[in-house]
Amino acid sequence: MTSPNPAAPTMRALVQDTFGGPEVLRAAQVARPAPLPTEVLVRVHSAGVNPVDWKTRTGGGMAGVLGDPPFTLGWDVSGVVEEVGFGVHTLEVGDEVFGMPWFPRAASAYAEYVTAPARQFVRKPAALSHEQAAAVPLAALTAWQILVDAAEVRPGQRVLVHAAAGGVGHFAVQIARHLGAHVIGTARAGRHQWLRELGADELIDYTAVRFEEAVKDVDVVVDLVGDEADETSTRSLDVLAPGGLLVAVPSGVAPELAARAADRGLRTSPFLVEPDGAALARIAQLLSEGALTVEVADVFPLEQAAEAHRVGETQRTRGKIVLNVAAE
């Protein structure tokens, strides 16, 4: 990464110069971005940490989009509008906002400032802290776009959410319930009571029983695990009702899996989330009304992003991990 111009404003950021383990993340002073027309400059208070972050750090995830390092990770942002570019009418300086800008292009959220199109941010619900708000966008938009746009879930349908206690999973449980579905989740037994409080109707301890032996006649499977983990996607075909839909997030849908599903009269869909200001505004409204809640498992200072990644990669967190970039 090139050194900042001494005469230009700089900011603190976490950068990586090579692919690798958490230790490749390092603090640096870099040039502060400036908003183009229709963009806003946001002073970041908190940044969410997602599986795509640590996958990209190692050369997977969105590394193919970002290219080779150096780059700065992160897409979830909660902060305050510091400057608005020409043509911005939806936000003003001083607005508290949150969003998932630019995905899958670089947003560089592990930094003190980000710039992005104004309509990729919405105003932060007043009841949420910046740490809570930073935990929302990527996970909640993923769940929303799967259930509302891809699956078009209707009242009375049966929805199975794999990894229901995770970042996307705990939103998927709540959004499916909001849509009137009968919600089934897989999670360790210790998470079951909490997930029932979020709206799950049935829960399966995947460490004690094969989920395909415990549930059937499912209309939609939200697979947040993938075939790489014990062939979860392939096994999910066994629980789908005729015409049912498998939405596979982490590893997508291999041609063999799609063919096997089609032979059985089932549907499959890969999925990748995208910025969606209108959907995020609806999610913000549900959060303000108390119809949705967000669970923050851990908060780390920006300089401890490496430790945040180590914790996240254990796949044992309840909800989301967040980086505190600036004190509120």
Image (cartoon, grey):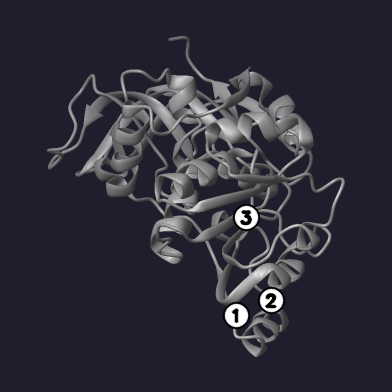
The quarter of the image holding the C terminus is top left
Residue drawn at point x = 73 percent, y = 72 percent: 238
On screen, residue 142 above or below 313: below
Looking at the picture, tell me which residue is in the foreground, 199 or 106: 199
Judged from the image, the secondary structure of the residue bearing numbered disc 2 is loop
Looking at the picture, tell me which residue is in the foreground, 151 or 44: 151
Q: Is residue 38 visible?
A: yes
- Tell me the tag on residue 63: 3
Left-right relation of 108 to 250: left
- Tell me the tag on residue 254: 2
Name the image quarter holding residue 44: top left
Residue drawn at point x = 32 percent, y = 48 percent: 279
- Tell me the tag on residue 191: none
Q: Earlier in the sequence, mark 3 or mark 2?
A: 3
Left-right relation of 162 to 177: right
- Read off the residue under disc 1: 266
On screen, residue 6 above or below 114: above
Name the image quarter holding residue 321: top right
